[in-house]
Amino acid sequence: MSGFFRLLARNRLALAGLIVMGLVVLLALLTPLLPLADPDVTNTANRFKPPLSEGALLGTDHLGRDLLSRLMWGTRLSLAVGFAAAVIAATLGAAIGIIAGFYGGRTDNVIMRGVDMLMAFPYILLALAIVAALGPGLMNALIAVAAVNIPFFARNIRGITVGIAHKEFVDAARLSGMTDARIIATEVLPNVVPVIVIAMSTTVGWMILETAGLSFLGLGSQPPQADLGSMLGEARSALITNPHTSVVPGVMILIIVMAINLLGDGVRDALDPRLKSGALSRPMPTTLVDRSAPVPKPSDDGLLSITALETQFRVKDRVYRAVGGVDLHVEPGECLGIIGESGSGKSVTALSIMGLVASPPGVITGGAAYYRGDDLIGAPYEVLRSLRGRHVAYIFQDPLATLHPLYTVGDQLIEAVRAHHPTPRAEARVRAISLLKSVRIPNAEQRIDSYPHEMSGGMRQRVGIAMALANDPDIIIADEPTTALDVTVQAQILSLLNDLRRERGLAIIFITHDFGVVAQLCDRVAVMYAGRIVEGGPTDTILNAPAHPYTSRLMACVPELGQGRRVLAAIPGLPPAVDNLPTGCAFADRCHKVQPACRTADIPLSGPSDGNRVRCIFPMTASSEASA
Ligand SMILES: Nc1ncnc2c1ncn2[C@@H]1O[C@H](COP(=O)(O)OP(=O)(O)OP(=O)(O)O)[C@@H](O)[C@H]1O
């Protein structure tokens, strides 16, 4: 709750709205206690007194009634009616929406067609019809305003509920034997309450206006009772001769509605977790680059050479150092494996190369990535766009997130083929079919017209791989591409990638958690921890004699088939938070070989450039391992 108020207070306009609304509500609550004149007592001798007259701070109206007093009582009434109408509309609308969305089918159809009928009328006409049927009066105006707003809430909440009703946690609740009422109360309602609050906060002002509108037309509060709308209505005839009688309630309506709307926007932003992290702000086409240090020279002239790459996420006042000075290089026909625990910075390193880290919040703060001698970091968008997919292609981890649900896989493959090579559609289709065959999709001629949801997870992943191959790239950056595949398909895909790099000199950067895949495919491997490479070198050397305690413990976690029973040694503790990295070795807290010297200063990556390089001052040796 305190987090919510902190976020709300950060939005200056919302804070201003909150303060103004707080004052208005406070004044409305204190009105009966204030020494004000009776708002309904007429005194025609004092008609139309101007503001700042003696005994009438805001002047008097056409019947000589004190405008300040009428304003205070009128505001109190308008606020009460507006809030009450909002609560009634939200409660009934949400209940209708939840029932329609949860039960679906005929229940949904009957309820929502009724709601549609209500929505078919212009809302003010409907409100007028309801008040005309019930008779003028403030209570009837309240009922009318609530009734015309019920469909708005019902439709919104029904949409959210339909999505939630088919989620796995609702299925799990059903399986555990919960009744529908309990599922609605404990599983559905908590998920829709923020939406109800957001919808309410943005519509209260609107309902106050609608109530004022009905009173203005003489259908709401009845004389002598004052609300803001009726005050405006009564002042209509004196608009030119005595404008203060209209300005006083008009300004109050403006203040209230502005304050509520600003506050409502702030509440919406503070309650929506996606808005909080800036996820809905439009990311820039390439990652923002803010390099203060001079750009490093390439350490060698490989196909792709990454030098001292640093990428951060700047979220509000926190800085997450996701990648903290990474050096990597890959040659044509070579496969480089990147391995490390979840959150170690593997994906962010890979995405930084082509400027694909979303900005905001991502910023590349240092280093360079040379592709055939040209630095890609900070390269113009057009340059990166022409390289993306054509020379450097990515295979992403989550095939469902990368394929568009509304296009067939064929359309998407054809689009990928034609993005960089203008080809007739028929020719691109033939190429797409051959790509699907090359990733071993059975029945490719028919499957090309399938939608992503009609394919299994493994097939979708293979479509993602086919798409990466569409333009014969020089480098493929594969981020855990085989995680969703069964072992036989995984073996096929790995051998396909292996063939491609042999035949075509394709370079592969393969991000994985699986040492088995590294052993099978990679020539060299880099082990990452807390955003840095802690060990790197030829795969055989590292797998046979890991030098960093982290690498050795990571390997000890891997079960081995056919090696008999052995205890799997999990690494104790958790990786450090990248917004609060310790001095010295980031693995020190979890390391069985830690010494005080490990925590004093930064530890460089040392060792021969063509051999095993390690970021440790007490690396593992055969003898130390034996004694451990
Ligand atoms: N938008 C973001 N805001 C703040 N921190 C982020 C953001 N995206 C990633 N991070 C942080 O950056 C670090 C590196 O994340 P990254 O996705 O590269 O890890 P990874 O090693 O690829 O993990 P996995 O194996 O689970 O994919 C993590 O600590 C993560 O929490």
Image (cartoon, helix red, strand yellow):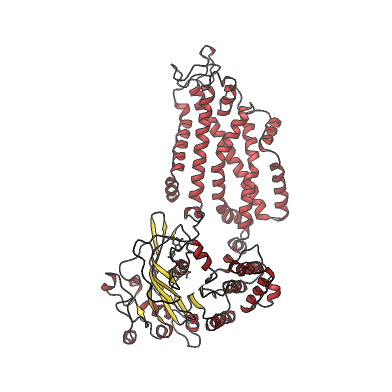
Q: Is residue 220 rendered to the left or right of residue 111?
A: left
Who's the residue at 51% across and 34% down the image? 256
State which quadrant residue 15 falls in: top left
Q: Does residue 590 appear to the left or right of 427 in the view shown?
A: left
Q: Position of residue 518 (x, y in %)?
A: 47, 80
**The furthest residue to the top:** 45
- Answer whether residue 410 is visible to the viewer in this image: yes
Indicate left or right for 88 with 260 as reference.
right
Q: State the residue in front, 362 or 418.
A: 418
Query: Residue 567 location in percent, x, y?
Result: 43, 82
Q: Residue 411's image quarter?
A: bottom right
The image quadrant where one finds ligand 1 is bottom left
Q: How many numbered marks appear?
A: 0
**Quadrant, the C terminus:** bottom left
Does residue 573 appear anywhere in the picture?
A: no
> Depth check: 587 or 76 in front?
587
State the residue in front, 340 or 193: 340
Q: Is residue 310 above or below residue 317?
A: below
Name the spot of residue 46 as percent of width and height, x first: 51, 13
Give percent across and percent down for residue 591: 34, 75
Which of 165/423 is in front?
Answer: 423
The residue shown at (51%, 45%) is 265
